[in-house]
Image (cartoon, rainbow, N blue to C red):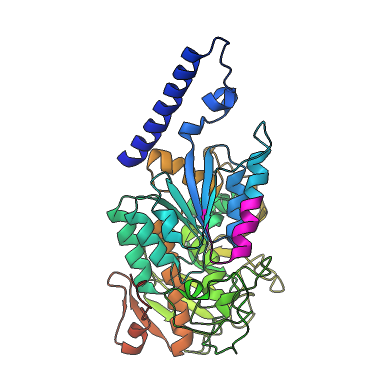
């Protein structure tokens, strides 16, 4: 924090000295644009948070363009191992920022192939990490050591051990870390959480989440390496695999996480998508910082779906639909209704709440939606929450501990699938009880120099 303040103070002093010097040397009055001084509600350049973006694929491009339109921050650098992506997003930023300049041009930006060059700059306050999860742990640790605050996409890690290392590093260096679990910052989910917490549907011991499966190891055939792609840096900590288009598409990205089809790079839908729903279930059930004590994969102990069970009897059930005869059907629920893709169904002893993105919120009894159950609160976007916390040094809604907890929950489900058996878990020690094979899956070897 002190280093951040010192950098901003230096920039403010330089602006004042430059203005004073110019005023003393010119006979004509010096005109300074109001935005340069922070007039008319604009943030003065000396007060903007400077950001570097690492990884500008499909998700990274979204973060990049959103932040480029935010007058509270200044994008100053990006890093990507794909030349097309570097050049395209640099041109995009020059267009956006250039439109705000009297000359119509902007050149105060630099793109790198190696993210370490970006992290070495002392004029960057924070970074957005939107690479694949194979890179998240190493970049996070190096960014924290470099004194950068961090926004990191989900899942935050490729393994359970890596998630814990990331928490320790962020805490050690006192960094602000926001995980890309943005459902915690949307109106419909915040309202659903408050309704559950207020007891409007009674005692809630079950949450159903829409879920997808896991990936296996693949050995896809080698294809010609596209020009402008640094494949060794793309692989990073992972075992060497030949380039294949299914892992990384050159040109405009067509998929969000294509690499997740191979367990060497990701764990599949359970970590890339279902992690959002598991995180929302945790938020509603007030299980942040906790973990299950049992994980049962489908087809084991007569269970049709993946189930997490907690010490107090609470259950999170991964299912796209409630099936009569296999699931208890709560009053007012139509069994033909699917649990929405990025959705959660909270079931209490006096009703239920079904929530999903884009404003979807239904409940039973229906009148509960009109209940005055809480005081007014201001909802900010996920990025705004992060930016505000960088200034105040508070922990954001999806702090690193929350990101780790939800990511670990996803990994537990993956390990249950891969072993094919009922597992017992110690959430305090973060180890499986009496299962050496499962414990061996909590970590994996990484290529040097990227181990954390």
Answer with the quarter of the image where residue 366 lies.
bottom right
Q: Is residue 311 magenta?
A: no
Question: Which residue occupies the foreground of this view, 257 or 30?
Answer: 30
Rendering coords of residue 265 (x, y %): 50, 77
Residue furthest out toward the top: 27
Q: Residue at x 41, y 62 (%)?
A: 139
Q: Is residue 180 left or right of residue 3?
A: right
Q: Residue at x 69, y 69 (%)?
A: 254
Quarter holding the C terminus is bottom left
Rendering coords of residue 446 (x, y %): 37, 78
Task: Confirm whether residue 424 shows in the render.
Answer: yes
Question: Which residue occupies the foreground of this view, 366 or 80?
Answer: 80
The relative height of residue 200 versus residue 212 in the rendered view (above or below) is above
- SS assignment for the magenta stretch, majority: helix
Residues in magenta? 78-91
The relative height of residue 327 versus residue 23 in the rendered view (above or below) is below
Rendering coords of residue 295 (x, y %): 43, 79
Q: Is residue 265 left or right of residue 94?
A: left
Q: Residue at x 49, y 47 (%)?
A: 51
The relative height of residue 227 versus residue 403 in the rendered view (above or below) is below
Rendering coords of residue 442 (x, y %): 36, 79
Q: Is residue 118 left or right of residue 146?
A: right
Task: Confirm whether residue 353 shows in the render.
Answer: no
Quarter holding the N terminus is top left
Question: Which residue occupies the foreground of this view, 211 or 300?
Answer: 211
């Amino acid at each position: 924090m002190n280093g951040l303040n010192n950098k901003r103070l230096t920039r403010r002093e330089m602006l004042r000295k430059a203005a004073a010097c110019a005023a003393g040397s010119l006979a004509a009055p010096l005109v300074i644009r109001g935005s340069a001084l922070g007039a008319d509600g604009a943030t003065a350049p000396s007060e903007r948070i400077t950001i570097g973006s690492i990884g500008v694929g499909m998700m990274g491009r979204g973060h990049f363009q959103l932040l480029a339109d935010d007058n509270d921050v200044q994008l100053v650098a990006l890093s990507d191992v794909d030349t097309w992506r570097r050049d395209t997003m640099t041109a995009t930023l020059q267009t956006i920022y250039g439109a705000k300049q009297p000359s119509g041009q902007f050149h105060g930006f630099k793109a790198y192939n190696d993210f370490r060059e970006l992290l070495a700059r002392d004029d960057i306050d924070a970074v957005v990490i939107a690479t694949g999860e194979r890179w998240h742990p190493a970049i996070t640790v190096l960014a924290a050591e470099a004194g950068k605050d961090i926004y990191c996409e989900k899942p935050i890690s490729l393994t359970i051990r890596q998630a814990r290392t990331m928490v320790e590093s962020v805490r050690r260096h006192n960094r602000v870390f926001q995980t890309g679990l943005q459902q915690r910052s949307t109106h419909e989910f915040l309202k659903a959480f408050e309704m559950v917490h207020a007891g409007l549907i009674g005692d809630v011991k079950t949450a159903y989440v829409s879920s997808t499966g896991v990936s296996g190891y693949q050995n896809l055939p080698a294809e010609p390496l596209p020009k402008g792609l640094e494949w060794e840096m793309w692989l990073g900590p992972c075992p060497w695999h030949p380039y294949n288009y299914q892992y990384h598409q050159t040109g405009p990205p067509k998929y969000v996480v294509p690499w997740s089809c191979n367990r060497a790079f990701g764990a599949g839908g359970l970590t890339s998508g279902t992690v959002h729903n598991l995180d929302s279930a945790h938020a509603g059930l007030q299980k942040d910082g906790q973990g299950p004590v049992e994980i049962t994969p489908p087809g084991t102990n007569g269970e049709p779906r993946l189930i997490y069970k907690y010490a107090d009897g609470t259950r999170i059930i991964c299912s796209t639909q409630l099936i009569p005869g296999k699931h208890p059907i709560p009053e007012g629920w139509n069994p033909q209704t699917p649990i929405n893709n990025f959705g959660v169904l909270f079931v209490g002893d006096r009703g239920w709440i079904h929530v999903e993105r884009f404003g979807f919120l239904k409940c039973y009894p229906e009148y509960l939606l009109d209940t005055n159950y809480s005081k007014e609160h201001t909802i900010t976007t996920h990025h705004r929450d992060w930016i505000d916390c960088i200034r105040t040094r508070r922990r954001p809604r999806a702090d690193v501990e929350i990101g780790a907890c939800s990511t670990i929950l996803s990994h537990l489900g993956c390990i249950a699938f891969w072993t094919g058996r009922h597992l017992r878990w110690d959430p305090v020690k973060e180890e499986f009880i009496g299962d050496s094979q499962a414990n061996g899956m909590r970590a994996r070897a990484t290529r040097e120099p990227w181990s954390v």
